[in-house]
Image: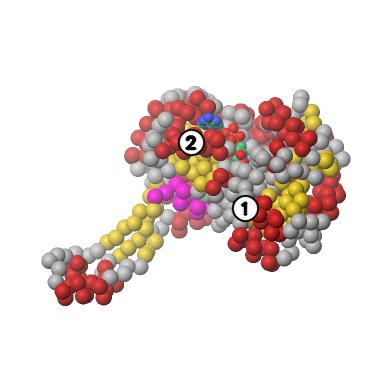
Amino acid sequence: MRTSTGTSESVKNPESPEALPVDAAATVARLNATFATGRTKPLAWRTAQLRALRRLLVEQEAAFAAAFHTDLGKSATEAYTTEIGFTLNEIDHTLRHLDRWLRPRRVPVPLALRPAGARTVREPLGTVLVISPWNYPLQLALAPLVGAIAAGNCAVVKPSELAPATSAALAHWLPRALDPQAVAVVEGGVPETTALLEQRFDHVFYTGNGTVGRIVMAAAARHLTPVTLELGGKSPAVVEPGTDLATAARRIVWGKFMNAGQTCVAPDYVLAIGEAATALEPHLATAIREMYGTDPAQSADYGRIINERHFDRLSALLADGRIVTGGDHDRVTRYLAPTVLADVDPEAPVMREEIFGPVLPIVRVPDVDAAIAFITARDKPLALYAFTSSPTTKRRLTTETSSGALCFGAPNTHLAVPGLPFGGVGESGLGGYHGEHTIDTFSHTKSVLDKPLLADPLRLAYPPFTTRKSRLLRRFL
Ligand code: NAD
């Protein structure tokens, strides 16, 4: 297991990261000891950490961008909007509202219990663990960390070993920017994560696939530790005839092929109603050409598949339908063209598992009833997208289906609205975050009741019970 080493010129820290212990138990013990001192609780500590994180991202944008490019071939612009810029927005939103979010909230007291005051108070949980995946390797490590710190916790961040350049960059920079006695980065893969999961944390926040999600939840259960599971799945994009197909196609292509399709909320497949299936095909091909040119392999804005295992898995799916556009692939560079598949059998392998790559199947259903039946017969998606001009279809999708999020007219954008909780339901996840919801995730909402000792109408509830007391209690409670 590796923790960070080295020093930084631009982001200074009073305590040397070199001295950090390297095993899971010692790391957690060290952070627990920090939490016990109370140092992470004052608002001033929290905001200072968030500002330091902000400064780090601004100062080291180029270093992180280089790491995303090494890991995923991400363009600098996409990396800014989906990784650095996204996290900066999350920090700014939190800094703007944190004071208010942390204020105690008064709660009305029933007549029979007055006089008394009641309020809720958010308190930090302690030391939390954030386990993040490779596809947005900075955003998915730091957006939870922002809330963990803002809520007053110590945190261990475990970046994905499948994005090693970004993992190394986080391990290098975070302890230099943040309080290293309160925030630790532990690099590594399954053995290191397993060692961490053996420790008792106060919350485990996991983003990744459902198989590992189950391992995380089972490990956390041993300590009765609450978990957040940000998982994936197949997010459909319903397209109804009569909608603006050119705009729908552009938005689906944008949402699907960013990061070469390796986005948890990307439209996984198009669920086209009736004639929209064939009518959409040329629009999708045009939109891909507009965004990535006639040879996307030459586009600086198109990413690469994370590794050979995923490349092999994805290229095998190309046989599952008629290729409308795309299909080119090269294992050496892990390039897989943005590909649209038509005439796809709902039982084909491409429709059985989350695709998580640049292959977009179109499945045709006859009508809205069939689309709803198709969605509800499968696992609840992380997101359901719909392109329709019909208020009735919108209402039916809202009330007759269940998904982590439901978005009309645009994929992927809901997670940039900080007021909306981001998370799944059922197989797509457990719990949510972003903005104030991250504070909720990493806090305990404590009930506080304060009843003066002077007057004591409570006497009514004390034994021995009389007929009169019983009558009054029934009236007032
Ligand atoms: P991954 O392989 O990077 O794994 C995620 C984390 O789990 C890593 O830190 C890894 O070290 C750890 N891990 C892997 N195997 C483990 C094990 N046996 N025990 C303990 N820890 C282990 O990422 P992935 O799972 O391939 O990520 C892709 C999946 O994540 C997709 O299903 C995608 O939809 C989902 N995802 C969801 C969100 C979301 O916010 N809901 C975001 C991104 C990705």
As drawn, is 304 to the left or to the right of 426?
Answer: right
As drawn, is 311 to the left or to the right of 98?
Answer: right
- What amino acid is at disc 2? Val
Res. 113 image quadrant: bottom left
Q: Which residue is mark 1?
A: 376
Looking at the image, is mark 2 or mark 1 nearer the viewer? 1
Q: Check disc 2 and report its element: helix, strand or loop.
A: helix
Quadrant, the C terminus: bottom left
Label 2 near ligand 1 (CB < 8 Å): yes
Q: Which residue is mark 2?
A: 216
- What amino acid is at disc 1? Thr
Say whether residue 249 is visible: yes
Q: In terms of image quarters, where does ligand 1 lie?
A: top right
Say above or below: 113 vs 369.
below
> Residue at the spot x=21%, y=75% of the render?
471
Q: Position of residue 283 (x, y in %)?
A: 83, 51
Res. 352 image quadrant: top right
Label 1 near ligand 1 (CB < 8 Å): no
Bounds of the magenta segment: 433-444
Q: Position of residue 298 (x, y in %)?
A: 83, 35
Q: Position of residue 331 (x, y in %)?
A: 76, 26
> Residue at the spot x=38%, y=37% of the render?
223
Say above or below: 388 vs 164.
below
Q: Mark 2 to mark 1: distance in Å?
A: 27 Å
Say above or below: 244 vs 172.
below
In the image, is residue 255 part of the stretch drawn in magenta? no
In the rendered structure, find residue 2 and report the number of the disc placed on it: none
